[in-house]
Image (tube, helix red, strand yellow):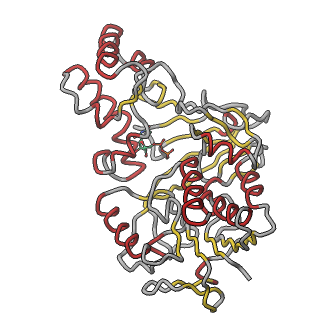
Amino acid sequence: MFDTIVVGAGFAGSVLARQLASVNNKKVLLVEKRQHIAGNCYDSYDENGVLVHKYGPHLFHTSNKEVFSYLNQFTDWSEYQHHVLAVIDGQKVPLPFNLNALEMLFPKSMAESLEKKLIARFGFGMKVPILELTQTDDAELKVLADFIYDKVFVNYTAKQWGCSPDEISSEVMSRVPVFVSRDDRYFQDTYQVVPTHGYTKMFQSILDHPNIHLMLNTNYNDIVSVDAKSGTVALFGNDFSGDFIFTGMIDELFSFTFGELPYRTIDFSFKTLQKEYFQEVATVNYPNNYDFTRITEFKWIHDLQTKNTTLLREYPRDYKGVANEDENPCYPVFKDENVSRYNQYKELAVQFPQITLLGRLAEYRYYDMDDMVARALEVFEHKFA
Ligand code: UDP
């Protein structure tokens, strides 16, 4: 009845399901354990009429024209440039930390001297990872590097990851570099947009194809079984020889054979205020105060005229494991020992060509939305086209 099973209706599963259904004319069974599509991009209008991202702010940004054109088929876009401020020493300064932040926090003459040095050393417009800046041999730049490291990264990272910035892959810190620039935007990509009617609507359109059969509220374990030793797949108790595309947790798929992979999750706390606006920009980070990492005010992202405003505070913590219903593994934890464990799973998985692993959880990778779409299209081209 079905040619292909896809588990998970986030970007990875939805894009691949769509390609298989529309280009290859395959009958696809798409299985999703939540009661909605769109994975962690899921959004909906709340009681204030504000379009909120239920699993934290999702800002689409890409310089990949192919990815942008691909998604263009499924949504209209609204221009949106994301701005983030970080509260440091009682002041709200632009993030990534840039020359404007420097001027706000340091005495004038020192700021001027630091600016000159940053520009001479790295070049105007360059992005410097904080872990690189802290290696500087210039005493004055070292003071700046240590200041930024302590005030922007140490405590935020302790909240977000439960460890210090040097205990986690340097890729993670590089996402928010020190920016030798006066550009206050969070991203500099060519295309910075949000789907005009929200991500969920865009996903509805991606999945709107007669060859895609969507089963919500369905744990894949209830209908599919995968033998961790032989890699054979059964659907409703019968051998299944078609492609099996899995975007869930790789450790769960292989029955935790090599132990559990750790993930971080976030407790999301939404709040309505009876006022038009609360803060100056969409997101304000609190690296050094409170238990939450940041507050997002969604009205800045989707420009809507509403009387009230909706805020989201994010409280990161360890993911407690599959046995706990409704736990949402948001982020793989990029430490060497975890990546080694993941590699054991990956070596097992490559023995089974029928199984394709794709996505943040299945590949234990920190994909942004655009990278995820690019990867899904690439896997389709290489393996299925
Ligand atoms: N980060 C930080 N302080 C900040 C913002 C980010 O230390 O004010 C670090 C933190 O470790 C975070 C990483 O940079 O996990 C990446 O931040 P990004 O905003 O890309 O995180 P996301 O929005 O994906 O959660």
Location of residue 235 with respect to 52 vertically, above or below: below
Location of residue 2 with respect to 198 vertically, above or below: below
Residue toward you, 16 or 267: 16
Location of residue 28 with respect to 361 vertically, above or below: below
Residue toward you, 305 or 211: 211
Residue 87: x and y, percent? 46, 30
Residue toward you, 227 or 26: 26
Hey, which quadrant is residue 39 in on the image? bottom right
Q: Quadrant where the C terminus lies?
A: bottom right
| Residue found at the very far top of the displayed protein | 109
Residue 164: x and y, percent? 30, 47
State the residue at coordinates (54%, 66%): 327
Location of residue 299 with respect to 106 vertically, above or below: below
Q: Quadrant where the N terminus lies?
A: bottom right
Residue 262: x and y, percent? 40, 64
State the residue at coordinates (63%, 42%): 311
User: Ligand 1 falls in which quarter?
Assistant: top left
- Tell whether 14 sits left or right of 347: right
State the residue at coordinates (47%, 25%): 93
State the residue at coordinates (65%, 49%): 53
- Tell whether 26 sits left or right of 245: right
